[in-house]
Image (cartoon, rainbow, N blue to C red):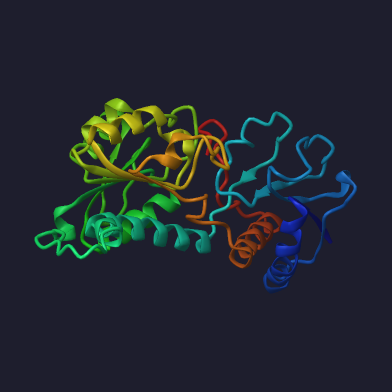
Amino acid sequence: MINVLFSAQPKSWAEYEAPLRAAFTKAGIDAQLGTEFDPADVDYIVYAPSGPVSDFTPFTKLKAVLSLWAGVETMVDNPTLKVPLCRMVDHGLTESMVEWVTGHVLRYHLGMDKFLSGQDGVWRAGTAAPLARDRKVCVLGLGALGAACAQALARLKFEVHGWARSPKAVEGVTCHHGASGLDDALSDADMVALLLPDTPATENVLNARSIALMRRGSFVVNPGRGPLIDDSALIAALDSGQLAHATLDVFRVEPLPKEHPFWAHPKVTVTPHIAAETKATTASEVIAENIRRGEAGEPFLHIVDRAAGY
């Protein structure tokens, strides 16, 4: 029998215990699952950085760390972690992200804000949106989440361009990569959605220079990571009219401090990191499949490239 340690906050254990046990049974995994083991007896750790484990040295039998989080920027540099680290790619989370991104892109495309805030008796004729095919949407980041969002927007007939650090091929999406590719992807974009990981190479990818490449009066949605955007450059672009509005779900500090200028800015919508979250039922299926693979000697899914940071 294998031992699986659940290392996260206590409230997460209450949420995940039953779905994990059900997923293990369905996958035919004979395992002891719990929150307390002798570290020397642990085969797998179901892990969140907010949990009690930060030193993996005592876990001498450990085969893999299976993260409950999609982002791994707080884990990749842990020098005690010597075994494979698998990030969470959860189809439930992916569906949520697609819905959030598509919803806000459509909100901007259709100009809904001016109608929702303008129930004042003024007949705003002549403000119908163009067709989606006449809007360029740029998706920065073409991993599992970014590719899914880009394809959903392409199916709505937006002209979708995507960018990644390395070459990608996504059906229905014009893909760019590298430094020059970033400029091409952003050039004259009407809307930009950020779905990149947080790494030193992606910090402030949206800055004064890159924002200037976008069409004047364009829009930004960021459900990816807070450090992807230079906050000061974003505010300056909103104030100048280069950007019309930004909807931000992630921030450098969370919860977003009350004194942060985003809260009071008339051209910023703040949402409290709700674009997508891991779903216990579907995430448990991903965890169970990776343990099954580990025990069968098959490659793990979603292994993190420590050098790349994701």
- Residue 308 % position (x, y): 50, 33
> To which quarter of the image does residue 53 belong?
top right
- Residue 55 % position (x, y): 78, 35
Q: 99 or 160: which is nearer to us?
A: 99
Q: 67 or 228: which is nearer to us?
A: 228
Q: Relative to 181, is 45 on the left or the right?
A: right
Q: Is residue 230 visible?
A: no
Q: 172 or 251: which is nearer to us?
A: 251
Extreme residue toward the front, this view: 121
> To which quarter of the image does residue 248 belong?
top left
Q: Is residue 73 visible?
A: yes
- Tell me the quadrant of the picture where the N terminus can be found: bottom right
Q: Relative to 106, is 276 on the left or the right?
A: right
Extreme residue toward the left, this view: 126
Q: How many circles with numbers are drawn on the protein?
A: 0
Q: Residue at x 28, y 33 (%)?
A: 239
- Residue 141 % position (x, y): 38, 43
Against 252, is 220 above or below? below
